[in-house]
Amino acid sequence: MSMQRRFLFLVNPISGTTSKAGLPLLIQQKMTAAGVDYAIENTVASGDYSFLEEKVRDFTDIIIAGGDGTINSVVQALRHHPVSFGILPSGSGNGLAFSAGIPKDAGRALDIVINGQPQATDAFTINGRFACMLCGLGFDAQVAHDFANAGKRGLTTYIRKVVSNFWTAQTHPFVLENGRDSLQLDAYFISIANSNQFGNQFTIAPKASLKDGLLDIVVMLRQSKWSVLLQTLRQVTGLVQLQSIEQISAEASVLYFQTNAIRIHNPSGALLHVDGDPADSSHLFDVQLFPGAFQLIYP
């Protein structure tokens, strides 16, 4: 006999810029109306959720009120349990939630948690580190590192970091290996995308899907900064076509292709972010898709 639904809400009180003061009352109202039993816990700054290993067995659904970094930590820790994950987007970017069609409005997101359908959702690993949404090397990772040290959260701070880094950004040498083929190139950034966006509806991989068993690789190659702006606009607006592995060339402006695994040599030690959070870099990255890694509740 299946367990009656029981929700465990994990609330990050400091994610994003919006106060969470009214969220417990809203959760209570929605859960009472739906007749669903629930509990609320605060997230932990360490990202270590091993303390929930026993408690999670009493719940069917884990609902995360936080941003992409919090989602990464919780899903990574608890995905081996037979639970579904829901999201109440309350981070600075909310890239995974927006890619899944989950709105930022807490009331509407709670309705999806209650009435939506859990579906198998891909993830991936980079040098064994779990990722739900998107990893980046180079420019966007520099922005992520600066944003993490800014002291202030929110979209305005993020945009300031993008602008302050853009005109001084330099390319990095990389070697991409996909199967038996390799390609040497200089690039401003490499995005490894499971979701279609960085967050805040800023699309970088318009063809990406959380459920297609593929990763979208976007490489912004060496070119003028004005050309970078134009090519980024094309990615954001979806005016791009996927390239086959055979079509990719270091002579292009942008590489955009799909794969389920890739190896990246990073001899200059370009910075790395994982799901928007700064991460330790390496001179070599092995990236592997993890199909159907967890159950996510969709609209």
Image (cartoon, rainbow, N blue to C red):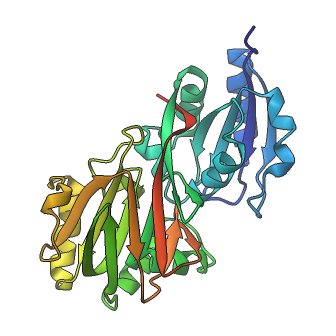
Residue 135 at x, y percent in the picture: 46, 64
Quarter of the figure with residue 18: bottom right
Measuring 72% from the left and 19% from the top, which residue is drawn there? 5
Quarter of the figure with residue 19: bottom right
**Position of 92 compared to 228: left or right?**
right
On the question of residue 285 being in view, the answer is yes
Measuring 40% from the left and 67% from the top, which residue is drawn there? 263
**Position of 88 compared to 246: left or right?**
right
Q: Is residue 150 above or below residue 232?
A: below
Measuring 58% from the left and 61% from the top, which residue is drawn there? 128
- Total numbered labels placed on residues in the image: 0
**Position of 210 compared to 227: left or right?**
right
Q: Is residue 15 above or below residue 267?
A: above
| Quadrant placement of the N terminus | top right
Q: Residue furthest front?
A: 180
On the question of residue 22 being in view, the answer is no
Q: Nearer the viewer, residue 179 or 1?
A: 179
Residue 124 at x, y percent in the picture: 50, 52
Residue 122 at x, y percent in the picture: 48, 42
Quarter of the figure with residue 191: bottom left
